[in-house]
Image (cartoon, helix red, strand yellow):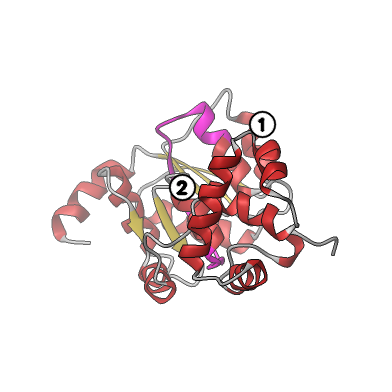
């Protein structure tokens, strides 16, 4: 963070209201202490996602710091609930997850910043100031993940991943079309795209590569 950003932050942070959602008390206290130290006094912590969801209709925040691995409510459900109530909400995801399919879900939901829990706590201030300036923030470790996974135009879309799961379950194109309320031609288009993106020779190869790359999990198409 350069000097101008630091000066700007000193004035802007003190007027912020921040909600932090995490099921680990040490994480909550660590973030709250850091924010208080930087002049943010309106910090509310939640050890359960449902607690925040309960007050959303009556109370919004300037910044939401969310763990997507909450035990009571799926973190993406929480993000959707925040967005539904406050479309312009600034959401920072704080996570341990590096799975490619989860990364795609975060990006597709337009989260404003992504921090790994292995990242230095102090980077949350840099992330907050960045999103307040209308930009997205990704911690250095996250950018390394993107580079390592080589995420680009070849990553399946969310719709393609839905088709991929149904293919792995053994559904026909007609069955998938009925399940997803699309035409068979659309399913066939997604199928061809998946084979191209994953460079698969057949369905078995497609499913095997999809699991290896983290797009789907065995539990997505088995009873285990």
Percent position (x, y) of residue 3? 15, 59
Q: Nearer the viewer, mark 1 or mark 2?
A: 2
Q: Which mark is residue 108?
A: 2
Is 120 placed above or below 18 here? below
State the residue lying farthest toward the top.
Answer: 58
Q: Which mark is residue 54?
A: 1
Percent position (x, y) of residue 103? 50, 59
Percent position (x, y) of residue 224? 84, 65
Magenta residues span 81-100
Placement of the N terminus among the 4 image quadrants: bottom left
Q: Secondary structure at mark 1?
A: helix
Is 185 placed above or below 55 here? below
Q: Are marks 1 and 2 in contact (CB under 8 Å)?
A: no
The answer for how far apart the CA atoms under marks 1 and 2 are is 25 Å
Question: For the residue carrying disc 2, how many other residues have a C-alpha within 10 Å: few (<14), some (14-19), or many (20+)?
Answer: few
Q: Say left or right for 70 vs 79.
A: right
Was residue 86 drawn as part of the magenta stretch in this picture? yes
Q: Earlier in the sequence, mark 1 or mark 2?
A: 1
Q: Residue at x 46, y 35 (%)?
A: 61
Q: Residue at x 32, y 45 (%)?
A: 13
Is 42 placed above or below 56 here? below
Q: Which mark is residue 126?
A: none
Specify the quadrant of the image occupied by residue 148.
bottom left
């Amino acid at each position: 963070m350069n000097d101008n950003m630091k000066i700007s932050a000193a004035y802007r942070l003190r007027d912020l209201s921040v909600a932090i959602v995490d099921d680990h008390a040490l994480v909550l206290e660590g973030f709250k202490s850091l924010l208080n130290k930087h002049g943010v006094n309106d910090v509310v912590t939640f050890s359960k996602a449902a607690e925040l969801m309960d007050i959303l209709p009556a109370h919004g925040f300037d910044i939401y710091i969310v763990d997507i691995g909450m035990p009571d409510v799926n973190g993406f459900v929480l993000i959707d609930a925040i967005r539904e109530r406050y479309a312009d909400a600034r959401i920072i995801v704080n996570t341990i997850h590096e799975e490619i399919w989860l990364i795609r879900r975060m990006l597709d939901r337009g989260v404003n910043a992504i921090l790994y829990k292995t990242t230095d706590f102090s980077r949350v201030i840099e992330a907050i100031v960045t999103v307040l300036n209308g930009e997205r923030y990704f911690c250095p470790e996250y950018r390394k993940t993107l580079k390592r996974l080589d995420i680009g135009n070849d990553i399946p879309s969310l719709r393609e991943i839905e088709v991929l799961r149904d293919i792995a379950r053994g559904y026909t194109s007609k069955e998938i079309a009925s399940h997803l309320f699309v035409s068979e031609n659309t399913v066939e288009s997604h199928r061809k795209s998946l084979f191209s993106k994953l460079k698969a020779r057949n369905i078995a190869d497609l499913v095997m590569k999809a699991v290896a790359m983290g797009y789907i999990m065995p539990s997505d198409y088995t009873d285990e």
